[in-house]
Amino acid sequence: MESVFAVVVGVLYATGIYLMVRRSIVKTIFGLALLGNGANLLIFTVGRLTAGRPPYIPAGELAPLPPVADPLPQALILTAIVIGFGVQAFALVLIKRVYQTVGSDDVDKMTTTDTIADTGRTP
Amino acid sequence: MNHLLFLPLLIPLTTAIICLALWRRPDLQRIVSLIGASALMLAGWVLLTAVRQQGVLSVQAGAWAAPFGITLVADLLSAAMVCVTGVMGLAVAIYSLADTEPEHERLGYHPLMQVLLLGVCGSFLTGDIFNLYVWFEVMLIASFVLLAMGGKRANMEGAIKYVVLNLIASSLFLAAVGILYGVAGTLNMADLARLIRDAEVTGPLPVIAILFFTAFGIKAAVFPLFFWLPASYHTAPIAVTTIFSALLTKVGVYALIRIFTLIFINEIVAWQPYILTVAGLTMTVGVLGAIAQYEIRRLLSFHIVSQIGYLIMGLGLLTRLSLAGTIYFMIHVIAAKSALFLATGMVRRIAGTTELKKLGGLYRTEPLVAVLFLLPALSLAGIPPLSGFWAKLALVWSGLETGHYITVATALLVSILTLFSMTKIWSEAFWKAEPEGAGTAPFSTVTLPKGSFWLMALPTGFLGLTTVIIGLFPEPLYALCMEAAGQLLQPTAYIAAVLGGSP
């Protein structure tokens, strides 16, 4: 099962990185979202996959009997999903504003802050 | 007494909430954020004093025993950085009184600044790697909004680069945290340090370490991951640029120091040549980039990168003296660089531009501003007896002691280039005669109202004076840095404070 997850994580990372090296900022944001999902699935996988063994403590015991699924990676992922959601929502609004301001979604048109400027009043 | 650790988090959080409640009253928000920043500075100072007297402090939120609960820890480095954060928060809050556009205030400038301070303090105080990730995100989301606030083309272009690069760094950081948990089974930093020192962790630790180094390297802007910084920092309002330059990259450096001295100590020893190479290249490329620029804010942004190189150099050398030098350098560069940015803001308000070719003669018309700029500029270049000299001396000394002559030579050469670059700003903006066509609209020099002039000059002068004072009397701060470096290299006190003395 781990190998399937490993391949899926790999595909998510590869797709994410491919989208990010495209020139369109829309694709960049999609790439970031995929990268985030890849990272979440990675945490899930390296936290050991234990199917069908929820970490309940049976009556009369003080700790769950191993092997049980580790709940902590899932808690980490949940937190990361929430954070990722907020950040991606912001990024989407940002690219909309960028598109409105610059008039293009091509990153090659967004070089004015990189060049050595010596003309014009600073913004 | 340990509940002191909550104060640097509660104060900015409360201030931000009060500011949000006063959404329609920017005038009241100003007062609230000023009070909040003063309280944070005070709390930082109290925390630093307590840590000096009682050693490393730690508190488990909700009284869940470590390593299961949420841990806050303050050793001397954390406490000193929280203290500096408070000082910077107050300086920028005062400066903002005179130099914030009403539009930004309506968009929530004050609460966002407090959230930023909250994220920074949280990153300094947390004792858990996943929490470090969460605090980073708190800090980032506030910084995203602050950077994009202007809504002009430059703001938008700067923001998109900054946002994308930082999100990539965050996802690398998250992946590294996940793998580390899979390998070690804990995310409590003290617990990790204990496990690794007892050699109880086996697994791909170098891979995890390189992921952390890349993630924090992007945030700290080290070579070759720094390109987002000079492309974005200069687009923000000057107060925002100042707080970014003072705190955000330094949080990245802090995280590098913390993770690599506490957890990946074997990796950093093994990688010393590479880390020193990265440090040398960061210094050199940063300063060369600065020399090419003719706009003060862009020029200073490249200098941020260059100074990060010195901090990484201290981490790479990894002796007690070099780590003390790094901490001293960090405090010095926060004060000096912020003073430079704030003085630049004054220049911009007075002359209407920060283009060196359009500036001139400010020494004659605004002698005080010239002095406010000159002091931190000389300090940054490392002229004795200002603070930059002692910071560089400690690093160079420990480099010579350990025989890393090439790194030392690079550091000294970059120092000279920094001086050259500072002299360029000085002679172009302040010393040379006003260029042809100056004095005509839109580049006419204005006289600031007395009130706002002093509101801007006061924090600038205070930070500039700080570099003079810690330069003239380096001993107390230096002793503190040596102590903090000792704690970093011998983390037994840190581990014991978190895990309660149990082996």
Image (cartoon, rainbow, N blue to C red):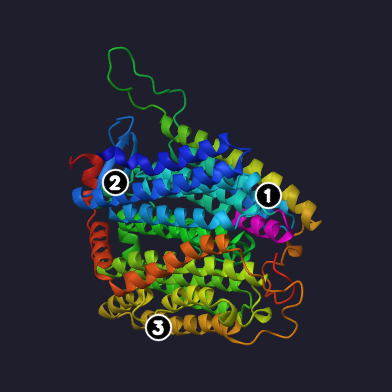
Dot 2: chain letter? B
Dot 1: chain letter? B
- The residue depicted at 44 percent of the width and 60 percent of the height is B250
- The residue depicted at 60 percent of the width and 83 percent of the height is B428
Q: Residues within 10 Å of mark 1 (few under 14, many from 20)?
A: few
Looking at the rendering, the stretch of residues picked out in magenta corresponds to B151-165
- The residue depicted at 56 percent of the width and 59 percent of the height is B239
Residue B103: assigned label: 1
Q: Position of residue B292 (x, y in %)?
A: 61, 80
Kind of residue at badge 2 = Ala
Q: CA distance from mark 3 to mark 1?
A: 44 Å
In this rendering, which labeled residue sits more in front, label 3 or label 1?
1
**Numbered disc 3: secondary structure:** helix
Q: CA distance from mark 3 to mark 2?
A: 37 Å
Q: Is residue B68 above or below residue B478?
A: above
Kind of residue at badge 1 = Glu
Main secondary structure along the magenta-highlighted residues? helix
Disc 2: which residue: B190
Residues under numbered marks 3 and 2 in contact, where contact means CB atoms less than 8 Å apart = no
Q: Position of residue B481 (x, y in %)?
A: 28, 63
Disc 3: which residue: B412
Query: Residue A20's image quarter?
Result: bottom right
Judged left or right of residue B177, residue B230 is right
